[in-house]
Image: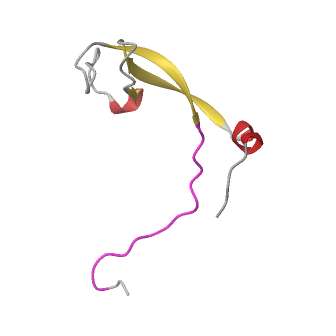
Amino acid sequence: MATTTLDEEQKQELEQIEIWKCKQPECKAWTRKEFVKEDLPDCPLCKNPMVRSYKHVPVVHKKGNKKFLVGKGRS
């Protein structure tokens, strides 16, 4: 079992993304900007207005081009 140390977490590569976050400080809901279609969305959890903001999230690297077979060609 692999454990992550604090040093490894600090070295983790981060990227800044645009998000919509709930205006209510008690509500922790947020979503990436590209997943929101409305100009001024409401929070999906508490239905209060959301505001645009930024968040730093870990960078996810794709691990190759995996192809998934469906149907008879699958073994």
| Residue 55 belongs to magenta span | no
Task: Give the quarter of the image for residue 67.
Answer: bottom left
Q: Position of residue 9 (x, y in %)?
A: 69, 41
Q: Position of residue 31 (x, y in %)?
A: 39, 29
Residue at 40 percent across and 24 percent down: it is: 28
Image: 22 above or below 73: above
Residue at 28 percent across and 85 percent down: it is: 72
Q: Position of residue 63 (x, y in %)?
A: 58, 60
Q: Which residues are magenta?
A: 58-72
| Residue 62 belongs to magenta span | yes
Q: What number of labels is visible?
A: 0
Residue at 77 percent across and 41 percent down: it is: 7
- Nearer to us in this view, 47 or 17: 47
Which quadrant: the N terminus? bottom right
Which quadrant: the C terminus? bottom left
Q: Is residue 34 left or right of residue 5?
A: left
